[in-house]
Amino acid sequence: MGAIERRTTCPYCGVGCGVIASVADNGSVAVRGDPDHPANLGRLCSKGSALADTLDLSSRLLQPEVGGKHVSWNHALDAVALGFQRVIDQHGPNAVAFYVSGQLLTEDYYVANKLMKGFIGSANIDTNSRLCMASAVAGHKRAFGSDTVPGCYEDFERAKLVVLVGSNTAWCHPVLYQRLLQAKKDHPDLSIVVIDPRRTATVEGADLHLPIRPGADAALFNGLLVYLSAHDEVNPQFVERHTDGLEDALEAAHASSPDIATVGERCGLAAADVARFYELFARTERVVTVFSQGVNQSSSGTDKVNSIVNCHLATGRIGRPGMGPFSVTGQPNAMGGREVGGLANQLAAHLELDYPGHRALVKDFWKAPTIASEPGLKAVDLFRAVEAGTIKALWIMATNPAVSVPDAGQVHRALARCEFVVVSDCVRHTDTAKYGHVLLPASAWGEKEGTVTNSERRISRQRAFMPPSGEVRPDWWIITEVARRMGFENAFAYQSAAEIFREHAALSGHANEGTRDFDLSGLAALSDAEYADLVPLQWPVTRERPHGTARLFGDGNFYTPDSRARFIPIAPREPAHATSCDYPLALNTGRVRDHWHTLTRTGLSARLSAHFVEPYIEVHPDDAAPLGLVDGSLARAESRWGTAAGRVRVTDSVRRGTLFAPMHWSDQFSSAGAIDRVVNPATDPVSGEPEFKHTPVRLVPMKAAWHGFLLSRRQLPQHNASYWACARGQGLWRYELAGNDLPKDWATAARAVLCAQDDKVEWIEYFDNAARRYRAARLTRGKLESCIFIGPSPQLPPRDWLVSLFGLESLDAATRAGILAGVPPKGQKEMGRQVCACFGVGEATICDAIRAGCGSVEALGARLKAGTNCGSCVPELKVLLAQQGQQQQIA
Ligand code: SF4
């Protein structure tokens, strides 16, 4: 038999790439990009390419548990239904809540929302998508009367100017970025402007970078609106026929941003750069302005979104090929969650909780006994209510709020005191799962069936290509079984995801008559076979538009009561919490290239973990020097809300006075790397989205009596270290360590950690008591089992050569001597930190090749293959080429 192939969708970011999974006779899985999927046309980024590495069962939750004991599904589902019913009976429906996720499929989301809003009768269901794109939703609704992304990815390729605002597209939406770079290659007159306080990898492909002062985006776009008006670039026909409110918006814009000099000052930018951006925008008809978390995650995120949309409305550049404002979502199904009402302030099918007519429509359609009549609690407020005891039963689905919600220490406190916590997830050990009274094993990617919607409104199928593991069940099944046990058998009698999808599609078309653009009525009668074969297509999908709709608003008709779009007057606001003497630096958080959320999945892949093996904090050289911090030091970021620790990276890619730290590390992978413990819980008053991009902090150097690292084939239970971080390597675990207490004797301490009692074990060791250095390796039948390196400072031998030794069957004498010397013997090389995840090419290897004459990305690709598969590392190759070029010039 040959391999079985299934077309499915990547479960990571909002690009929503199509994936072909091939399952061989022996069960092994290989993935490749789907050339027929319109989102990626065959491309995958480093994360998507490594999907097969993450199917490992070792970390999975495979059986239901109640009180830490394995139980039957019946027992667990009864416990959940009874637990929720008891709280509702005693305290009312608003005493319970669901916290759900953009990882859920649309069908899962649909039934969760239906149960909470129509049958329990509360709107206390919110999603982790609140954390990444709620401001875009609110901004769209204020301007368009609907939550609509007007364009499609093809617009990136048809534009002449693409403005990327608060979006490290190269790392966070890599395939979209690759499409953009290819478009620039094909059409060199396409300009790219990046607006970001950091010089990110995305900047490598840009014609202009505006390193804006954090939080100043609205002042910049207000200034653009003033400039467009002053230079006669407003489209009077469009404005007259299709919009309201330009004068008020202009007046507000004048107040904050009257001229380029003022804008430059407010935004911390050179006036000439501001002028260049404004001129480019003004003279280019086909402009797409892409915005993401850097805009949304702010206490004035909704205003920032509208300041961008205002400029597109003023010029009429919306809904036509190659133009429009474009929100890209962080999660694979953030859009699906918006469609079914996964946010606490929405009903299903883009209907509004605030409108009595909409509430009646949904209640009737569902034949529900009730319907929530007021918005529920948004993410941050929801966990406050849990800590306050107002919410007494909480069901968390497919997410890890103990790591990802701001002021995460508060979430820990809330979960610890909550009467009844249910966690349904595919992972057993997360920072959140440890608080679950009931754990429900959910199907993982590759095991489940349903749909997701990407950032361009494109609905794609996720398809199962593996049998379910252990006793796992799809989320929709788990939710409907609980609903049935709560007495709602008829409304939740679904037998398949297809059945739920048909109902969801029918609701979107119910009493619609063109009043709502979210309309899937053309899919409401799909047979099971048609659902199984559904090809990716963009909503709305109706009888008139059976193949979907690429763009909306090109005709100037919007979804406000009078069909006219609204300009919103914007008065830019500073971040909620200002820096101060005690907390003088502004912390910005985000993602790294090869990791996804809280490491529960990408942390399973050795090649994805090699890019960054531990949490880090980026700091400008001028801020690092007075603190005595150098590259590789350890430091703590401290705020009013909490503390996190990481390795210092000194770099001028962050602005003076700011720090950057990635959000991925949890208590499972580090002693104190969870940066969201530090992040302030301020939210946008309209969208409820938190201000992840600006928290006042101080940076405190961490002193340690010793530093070290340890590589081991086995995962080690404890490290006797006050600082630790761990990551998977190929067939091994990597630990970075530091401690305050020196052991009496390193040899005994190391043997205790590495369990060296076994007689067959061979030890090689090196001491230098004067220099406080200790190195040891443990071998079995000549094969390296583990090694440990200790020293007085973070300057320790390079690791990657040592990691490569774990792939050898035995070590020769020169290699053993090299281990103790901390340098590769002659003929072996240190490859350096991994840059290319696809081919495992390291920084040192790349720099050697550049010094040997490879002067371009193409030449590096030809010699090393680096950058020739997914292309995610190309921006870093460009940085290394530039750095080496500079060094050669200096030399
Ligand atoms: Fe997945 Fe990468 Fe595509 Fe995002 S860009 S959907 S992470 S393959």
Image (tube, rainbow, N blue to C red):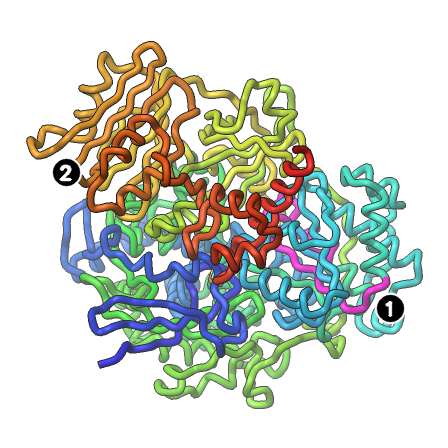
Position of 772 with respect to 282 (left or right) is: left
Q: Is residue 693 magenta?
A: no
Residue 709: quarter of image: top left
Residue occupying the far front of the picture: 826
- Indicate yes or no: mark 1 CB to ligand 1 under 8 Å: no
In this view of the protein, can residue 394 be seen by the observer? no
Location of the N terminus (image quadrant): bottom left
Give the residues in magenta.
283-308
For mark 1, give the secondary structure: loop
- The label on residue 9 is none
Residue 605 lies, in percent from the top left, at 35, 52
**Which amino acid type is marked by label 2?**
Thr
- In the image, is residue 304 above or below residue 832? below
Q: Can you give x and y, in whole percent of width and height, for residue 258 in the image?
A: 88, 45
Q: Quadrant of residue 615?
A: top left
For residue 235, the mark is 1
The type of residue carrying mark 1 is: Asn
- The residue depicted at 43 percent of the width and 82 percent of the height is 534
Give whichever of 616, 582 is nearer the camera: 616
In the shown orientation, is residue 102 left or right of residue 328? left
Disc 2 element? strand
Q: Is residue 143 above or below residue 784?
A: below
Q: Earlier in the sequence, mark 1 or mark 2?
A: 1
Label 2 sits on residue: 780
Which is more toward the observer, 848 or 410? 848
Where residue 62 appears, x then y in whole percent? Answer: 21, 57
Residue located 26% across and 80% down the image: 2
What's the residue at 93%, 58% (across, down)? 231
Q: Nearer the viewer, residue 747 or 275?
A: 747
